[in-house]
Amino acid sequence: MTQTLTNQSRSSALKALKCKECGAEYELQATHVCEFCFGPLEASYDFSRLSQPITRESIEAGPNSIWRYRSFLPVETDTPIDVGTGMTPLLKSHRLARQLGLKNLYIKNDAVNMPTLSFKDRVVSVALTRAQELGFSTVSCASTGNLANSTAAIATRAGLDCCVFIPADLEAGKVMGTLIYGPTVMAVQGNYDQVNRLCSEVANTHGWGFVNINLRPYYSEGSKTLGYEVAEQLGWELPDHIVAPLASGSLFTKIYKGFREFVDNGLVDDKAVRFSGAQAEGCSPIAQAYKEDRDFINPVKPNTIAKSIAIGNPADGVYAIDIAKKTNGTIESVTDAEIVEGMKLLAETEGIFTETAGGTTIAVLKKLVEAGKIDPEEKTVVYITGNGLKTQEAVQGCIGQPFEIEPKLGSFERALERSRTLDRLDWQPVLV
Ligand SMILES: *Cc1c(COP(=O)(O)O)cnc(C)c1O
Ligand SMILES: [Zn+2]
């Protein structure tokens, strides 16, 4: 329905789905696995078919959202679902950098991405735009929390029916942050990998558009915008080193693809960018394979507070390892205690309240610095992918309590005195 050579197709470079393993090409349908070798399918493009070349100026003249990069995204419409996703702040770090001994640290802050405060709004904006083009009226996902928030919110905005699947033990903020939009929510008694398996069966029987299953080749391309934006925000230049969290590994591989496409289209100079990945020790199948120099993943059962990145059988794990190796980066894991410390460190130095996934990334950044694996001069970008208000359970009991005082000056003065002598964790929420 969308393949004819109209004005639309000349503003889209989308060409085919291509198997990452054997290179077989497929039509641009809702399909994600190669029939010959069972490899994953990925969107491929022919940028020469665009009627206008992509330039820095044409991008800068676009909307203040991920859709300024529309020519690089796997859609054909001129009117994508634009809910203001993307173009989140890239902050030059001062206080965290000084504390870690780094001179050139930047923080890409997707804790304030729109509309649901995680990087998942990027992939869902793309997936649901494509879902509409392919004629789906019901969309769905297998989620560790943030994806359910995004899918439910953006589906509502687009007028699509929505049914999402989550593990039953998710944080309250993630569940509420889905229910409020009114989708059908299935809380599955099992971990994410079991949720995902169930969803694959539902996708086969119900004909729904699952953003991260049958629409995955389109969905995953949305993560490339985390590469494009950083390059543009650095003044059309690539960084020297990036540190990003790994769940399925998709985000990590797509930042890489985004940088390569910018180089190939002459938008930035080529540069050797090092890619380092972060996992929680309680679910670190990619970090373990990396450490043991394996090129295959041994699936694990997740047991960590970093639920949003707790995928025991990561689909893109081997591709993430390949990129870390060939770029001279690394993959590291940290304990739950270090994750909480990472969340507090980022909040106390930069005023950013991230969720457990961001705590994981900051804790890994710190570990890499301490191990001498980040040069203080390197232009390093750390990706913060989610918001701390959604995982309040993780820090409850580790950040102290407010003083409760009478509405009297004397009560305030006594409390102020105590605040100066006591450690914050020893504050008591009592009248003083
Ligand atoms: C989903 C998610 C990621 C990473 O996902 P990938 O599957 O590796 O693409 C990172 N951070 C947060 C907060 C997430 O929700
Ligand atoms: Zn194949």
Image: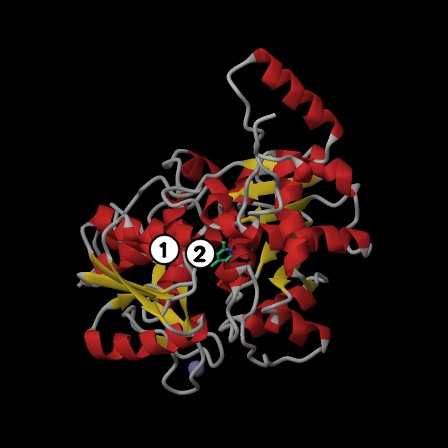
Question: For the residue labelled by badge 2, is the local secondary structure a helix, a strand or a loop?
Answer: loop
Question: For the residue labelled by badge 1, is the local secondary structure a helix, a strand or a loop?
Answer: helix
| Rendering coords of residue 108 (x, y %) | 56, 43
Instruction: Assign ligand 2 to one image quadrant.
Output: bottom left
Q: Amino acid at mark 1?
A: Val
Q: Indicate whether 138 appears above or below 236.
A: below
Residue 423 visible within the image: yes
Q: Is residue 410 left or right of residue 206?
A: right
Q: Which residue is mark 1?
A: 175
**Direction bottom: furthest residue:** 36
Q: Amino acid at mark 2?
A: Glu
Q: Residue at x 36, y 62 (%)?
A: 218
The answer to whether the residues at label 2 and label 1 have Cβ atoms under 8 Å apart is yes
Residue placed most toward the observer, 140 or 391:
391
Q: Is residue 140 left or right of residue 193?
A: left
Q: Which residue is mark 2?
A: 171
Q: Residue at x 37, y 70 (%)?
A: 17
Q: Residue at x 32, y 71 (%)?
A: 214
Q: Which disc, if any, is residue 367?
A: none
| Rendering coords of residue 347 (x, y %) | 61, 38
| Rendering coords of residue 79 (x, y %) | 24, 45
